[in-house]
Amino acid sequence: MLRVRYRKVVPYPVAVVLSQYYDYEHIEHVHPESLGRYVLLEQGERRNVYEQLWPPGLLQSLGMPTARSVVQHTYEPPRTMRFRFLCGRHRGTEVVTVLEEHPEGCLVDETYGVPGLPDWSLLRRLALPPIRRRVNAIWAEDIGVDVCHGGWPGVPERSAEAEAPCAGSSRSGEGAEVWIDVAAANDLVEERPLLARLVVPGAGPDAEAVPGDVVLVRASGRLFAVEARCPHSGGPLELGRCRDGREIVCPWHGARFALATGEPISGPALRALSRFRVRERAGRIEVAVNEPSAT
């Protein structure tokens, strides 16, 4: 068996990276071209079995069926995982992943074992560069997705108590409502979410402004402004889609929210989106926030 070892530091805590390995749902949203889609077949306390449907390639473009694998994912506490390809594409391959603490986040140590190949040192050196390029590309897809509150695909639904406050959300000691210019009206295309930077004025001449993000949507003749990150796992809603002119859908796990109320309609999110008053004035889009009171 040919074995190739790969090590990489990623800028996230071990617990966050570990949880990401179990988030099969995010694969089709973040890695559609590199990993395809996972379907959970069996679930246990420390052992899962899933079907991996690889992204379409040349054979599929010629009418051949999509390549598939059945993979057993085993967790060995505290930080080791094994992936065994039981049948289908890459049958017999085993990947052992060990996560370690690192000053810059998490050290991912992976060993790839491919059956039927001699363990020649020359062949191992030839195999390592393409494996490194492929794994680097997959990690870049994850890290390249903007997340908020230190979130990551795979982080479970957070409780309201653990949620970081959003700019403009209800909090004690707020002052008068003010309108903030956030975008040009011409930049807002029908049913296409737009990310806007919201800066809440500070309370006093020396106070720092509090930045935040909102997503603007123009749909069915109305304007909507909601918080920019899905409360389930921080998915970027500006990359989502507007549905039927009434809903916004998270691009990661498909959570759906009513634009008019912010309430979750379906999907893994439990908390409603924070909403903001919004208006169009003199060719500009303005969002209302509460100015913090001076202390």
Image: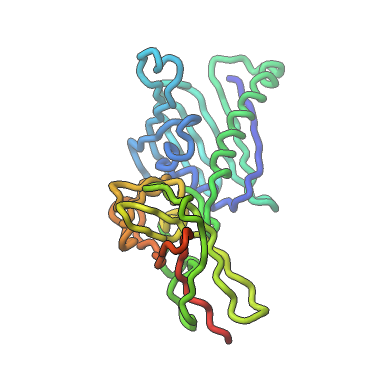
Asked if 156 appears above or below 91 in the picture, the reply is below
* Front-lying residue, 180 or 174: 180
Q: Residue furthest top?
A: 62
Q: Is residue 127 left or right of residue 92?
A: right
Residue 60 lies in what quarter of the image? top left
Residue shown at the point (48%, 70%) measured from the top left: 179
Residue 182 is situated, as x and y percent measured from the top left of the image, at: 51, 61
Residue 162 is situated, as x and y percent measured from the top left of the image, at: 46, 67
Residue shown at the point (35%, 48%) measured from the top left: 242
* Front-lying residue, 286 or 160: 286
Q: Is residue 156 visible?
A: no
Residue 112 lies in what quarter of the image? top right
Residue shown at the point (59%, 41%) measured from the top left: 98
Quarter of the image with the C terminus in it: bottom right
Q: Residue furthest bottom?
A: 295
Q: Is residue 245 left or right of residue 295?
A: left
Snapshot colouring: rainbow
Residue 245 is situated, as x and y percent measured from the top left of the image, at: 30, 50
* Front-lying residue, 223 or 22: 223
Residue shown at the point (47%, 70%) measured from the top left: 168
Number of numbered callouts drawn: 0
Asked if 238 appears above or below 37 in the picture, the reply is below
Quarter of the image with the N terminus in it: top right
Q: Is residue 21 left or right of residue 44?
A: right
